[in-house]
Image (tube, coloured by chain):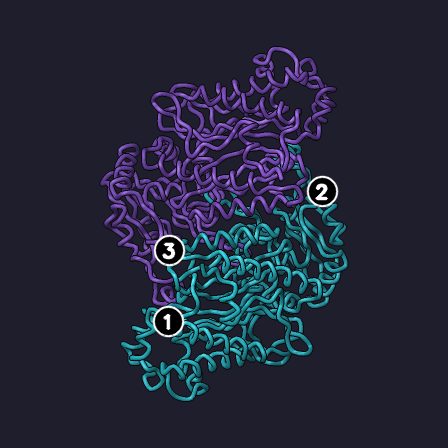
Chain colours: A purple, B cyan
Amino acid sequence: MHFGLFPESTYTARRRQLCSLVPDALILLMGNEETGMNYRDNVYPFRQDSTFLYYFGIDIPGLAALIDTGSGEAIIFGTELSMDDIVWTGPLPAIREMAAMVGVNKTEDFSRLAGYLREKQKSVLFLPPYRDINRIRLAEWLGIPLHEVQSRVSAPLIKAVVSQRAVKDVLETAAIEEAVSISTDMHLAAMRHARPGMKEFEVAGKMMEVAYGAGGRLSYNIICSKDGQILHNHYQGNTLQKGDLLLIDAGAEQSMHYAGDLTRTFPVGARFSELQRSLYNIVLRSIETASAMLAPGVRYIDVHAKAAEVLLAGLKEMGVVNGDPAEAVRENVHTLFFQCGLGHMMGLDVHDMEDLGEPFVGYTETLKKRTDFGWKSLRLGRALEEGFVLTVEPGLYFIPELIDRWKAENKLASFVNYNELEKLRHFGGIRIENNFLVTDAGFRLLGKPLVMTAAGVEAQLSLG
Amino acid sequence: MHFGLFPESTYTARRRQLCSLVPDALILLMGNEETGMNYRDNVYPFRQDSTFLYYFGIDIPGLAALIDTGSGEAIIFGTELSMDDIVWTGPLPAIREMAAMVGVNKTEDFSRLAGYLREKQKSVLFLPPYRDINRIRLAEWLGIPLHEVQSRVSAPLIKAVVSQRAVKDVLETAAIEEAVSISTDMHLAAMRHARPGMKEFEVAGKMMEVAYGAGGRLSYNIICSKDGQILHNHYQGNTLQKGDLLLIDAGAEQSMHYAGDLTRTFPVGARFSELQRSLYNIVLRSIETASAMLAPGVRYIDVHAKAAEVLLAGLKEMGVVNGDPAEAVRENVHTLFFQCGLGHMMGLDVHDMEDLGEPFVGYTETLKKRTDFGWKSLRLGRALEEGFVLTVEPGLYFIPELIDRWKAENKLASFVNYNELEKLRHFGGIRIENNFLVTDAGFRLLGKPLVMTAAGVEAQLSLG
């Protein structure tokens, strides 16, 4: 077998629960296909759809499944290997053998799926497609215009899937811990490897060795940049100078595709400068304060606000902002320095279930996602529940273009000391990120702990 | 600038030549988009379309271009960054600045492209799309049913593009050499790193460090397997035992996306056994013989046949096959051991221009690709020309399922000594692969030479 599976009963129980949540419907779950990179057959590493993995576990392309929630019957559709396939890709178990391992006793040739859907007696429910091929197939199979597919997705199905996937069981938590521990090793390798004169991509390459060498892969493209203020920065061509603050946001996906997601920021080949240490310790206090709040019933939007308040309190001590930090957060002052959200759900996806829609995953009927700058980037706001796995990742980002815009508008000038801020214009960015499980008692840090204090980080660095 | 470019004159000259090859038409060249992995925004590493790179060089998503081959005018369509984009992804030059660097003076917003096509006065020529999003766009923009897009591609345009891209200039050759040299370093690292007890993916991880650490990436997914007989085997979960023959087919893409593609096969933590050495030396003689034949005017299908003949001559010495090797090749005996092609064009794609169609890239009007087993997998058959870059990669593969099928049919029994072959049933596979430029004088090995003789390979191995 070329991929790992949980016990058969795990998948059977998940599907049984789904049937009870969405009674008397036909649920169509699409697996992913290979995707051509620069031509059809030079494919990106195959990534199965996460919801398909959750209910069916089988990690190969070319599959889809139907669940009749009335009868509870599931059918997996796929294509058996030909002799030519065996010559080129080696023998694999038959689809029906793989299906049996996840408790599915009925399989059909993939070509028969369209016919099943034409003869359907019930409404067919499906999830939002993020791959074009699945959008095309849904349109063709269900007779929907291509541009209408997205609007025909099933909200009840989304809600049911989210309610299940949001709460991680013991097996899933263990898988996530494995991914986080590999991620920890990636960051330790980076700290020990990074030296002045290196290119950023050399540090990233070392982390890839660790991720792949542990039988995993990356759960997302590595951010490894001395321009830490650029939030989604995948450029890695800068040469590192002694004392540059290097922000690394990197995580592994373990073999069953559960994700880890850690961030650390450290000075290259040097101890933290006084200014770096001051700002670093502000972010450190923010993550410590925020993490300590995690518990069932606590709204994550409130944790976010508290983390932002701690950031502003620190900046106030440095003379960069004025006024009461809590009031300043209500006025959105923090969004000049902390433009993104404090964290997100994590599981089979690093932003877990993001394509099912953040209104369903991170918010509720009564707590809607805000639309204003900063807050609109908070993916998770709702009250936490036992079994949720999430990231906590406060940061301080000094973005010259944003500072210029606010300053030109004299925006929130009673709170922002723009003259002091000018000194930090080219500082860059700092982020610290850990992964947590929400427990009955509060929370548990997942994975091998990664050094986090300035002194702890410095002890790992190559200071040669 | 976040990506490398050739001098402006390179792109201008390429487009001017294209205009002369396809007179008085409107050519639509599609760039690639970001592609979601497990959700829309968790993207695979961006890979620009190779033909777009060839004529326009700009390595960012969200672009397309029109070339009016009558007037020679080119327009690049793209979307300028918003302030929000700058906050999240950092500043980039404007589209018009990037366009100017490749000699294009006219740019338009991407949304205006559909309008341009509606008002067209000339027929619009396009290449085969391999990304679904581009297939959808072509269908919508040109009013073609989705399933008809593939049949409406322009053969004259394909032929023109192939005629240009097939012949590499000095700048391209240098880029390919860089990619091959990184690939050489990947293989050396693997040889020095591999030890009994390791998983195959640990060796692959080490190679990824080298590729990414050199500012490159992989030109295709690494094959790193003790089951070398499985031709496209991406499973890397086996534990390596002392003396296992490890086949590694791995190559880097350098920063401008030119590819390298090398294969070596070596025993893990040991010298070659007598049997391994005998079979290895057969493949070695095959690549040496084949490489020495490379020259303008030589048909690659004849090089393939000669390489196969050398393989059979070696197997004859071992008593596995009988008869005259050249005659045996004509009877397709070699396809039991060498099921694939001897090599392929290489350039911006590792199988260069594969999606433009092998009939156009590797064959001609008079030399058509064969359709029988073995030969149908030879991607390149035509007479070589100065400036072609290609791989030479003979191998011996003992595939139990294929041996069983032939034996059951008593196929070519006068040539195959099935009793002797049975002893090699679980031997696995050996491949040796190098990359060459066809020159006026014959050929030139590209990149830093990688050890190839059994003794040379052994000298690199960790035999501890």
Q: Position of residue B197 (x, y in %)?
A: 39, 54
Tell me, yes or no, if residue B396 can be seen here: yes
Q: Quadrant of residue A337?
A: top right
- In the picture of the structure, the residue carrying the numbered disc 2 is B93
Q: Position of residue A273 (x, y in %)?
A: 66, 28
The residue mark sitting in front, 3 or 2, is 3
1 or 3: tag closer to the N-terminus: 3
> Type of residue at label 1?
Phe
Q: Amino acid at mark 2?
A: Pro
Mark 2 falls on what kind of element?
loop
Q: Quadrant of residue B56?
A: bottom right
Query: Pointer 1 indicates a residue of which chain?
Result: B
Left/right of residue B401 with respect to residue B232 in the rendered view:
left
Q: Chain of mark 2?
A: B
Real-space Cα separation, disc 1 to disc 3, in angstroms:
20 Å
Q: Decide: few, some or many residues near mark 2? Use Cα within 10 Å; few <14, some 14-19, many ≥20.
A: few
What residue is shown at x 56% (from left), y 62% (from top)?
Answer: B350
Picture layout, residue B350 above or below residue A273:
below
Q: Nearer the viewer, residue A312 or B195?
A: B195
Q: Secondary structure at mark 1?
A: loop
Residue holding disc 1: B398
First of labels 1, 2 by sequence position: 2
Residue at 26%, 33% (x, y): give it: A20
Which circle marks residue A346 in the picture? none
- Confirm or deny contact between disc 1 and disc 2 (CB under 8 A): no
Q: Residues within 10 Å of mark 3 (few under 14, many from 20)?
A: some
Where's residue B413, x and y in %? Answer: 32, 84
Q: Is residue A436 above or below residue A269?
A: above
The residue at the far top in this view is A324
What is the chain identity of the residue bearing mark 3?
Answer: B
Report x, y in % for residue A189.
Answer: 52, 41
Disc marking residue B239? 3
